Amino acid sequence: MVARHAVAQDDEEETDAPSPVEPLLYDEGSAIIRRSEWSRAPGKQDLLKPAEGFTRLTVHHEGNGVNTHTRWDDVARDLNGILDAHMKKHWGDIAYHFVIDYSGRIWEGRSLGYEGAHVLANNEENLGVMLMGNFEEQQPSARQLASLNRLIAAVRRKYLISLSSIYGHRDLGHSVCPGRNLYAYVTGLRRDETDEEA
Ligand SMILES: [Zn+2]
């Protein structure tokens, strides 16, 4: 794996759009669970739009009931349920690029080679990350937030996404997503950039 990704990793100036089949970020040593490890159902490529890179990132919550699943099988079942629902909406694949479960595992969603389907009319250059749970009802776990930070750092090494371009779904659409408890954290990430500049 290291050798396979060595060239892409060294080329920080790469500006070409990612190839739809080229895995990205998985050379960061950050143990992201690949999509093929939790689903055998492929996306529908004819419904997917190749991504032109990412300049912003939007954080979502699952938004169903309280979810504190930590067992692999339980989380994989949840993810497959979400995938099925999104396929029925003809979104071509699960809407998000990454999902973080309650125990802090990071699961790959749709390939970074494609635009997401997570904010109505606002998916262009918009990388989608979903945390499992309902953060109107519960608090995100410390491990989920640590993984969100780790993922954002990895993404920002690959793409030019400023902290001020990290949004909660509610910033871009008519939604309570990602729930008040997670949204408070997301707005804190944006404040961090003000501190960086000061
Ligand atoms: Zn959302």
Image: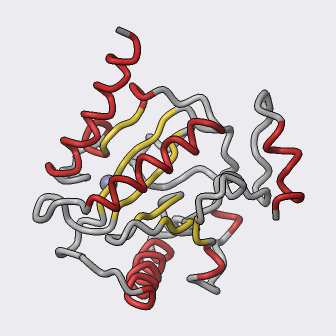
Q: Tell me the quadrant of ligand 1.
A: bottom left
- Above or below residue 139? Residue 51 is above
Q: Nearer the viewer, residue 193 or 97?
A: 193
Q: Position of residue 112 (x, y in %)?
A: 64, 53
- Residue at image position (18%, 41%) is 184
Residue nearest the viewer, comparing 198 with 127 = 198
Left or right of residue 84, residue 37 in this image: right
Q: Quadrant of residue 136?
A: bottom left
Q: In the figure, is residue 114 to the left or right of 55?
A: right
Q: Residue placed farthest to the bottom in the image? A: 73
Which residue appears farthest toward the top when viewing the image?
Answer: 198
Tally of numbered tags? 0
Q: Residue at x 40, y 17 (%)?
A: 196
Question: Which of these two is toward me, 131 or 171?
Answer: 131
User: With 189 as the anchor, is 34 left or right in this view?
Assistant: right
Quarter where residue 155 is shown? top right
User: Which residue is most to the left?
Assistant: 137
Q: Position of residue 117 (x, y in %)?
A: 48, 55
Q: Residue at x 42, y 29 (%)?
A: 163
Question: x%, y% of residue 185?
Answer: 24, 42
Q: Residue at x 34, y 60 (%)?
A: 144
Q: Quadrant of the N terminus?
A: bottom right
**Image position, residue 158 (x, y; %):** 66, 38
Report the quarter where the C terminus lies. top left
Q: How is the image coloured?
A: secondary structure
Q: Nearer the viewer, residue 35 or 169?
A: 35
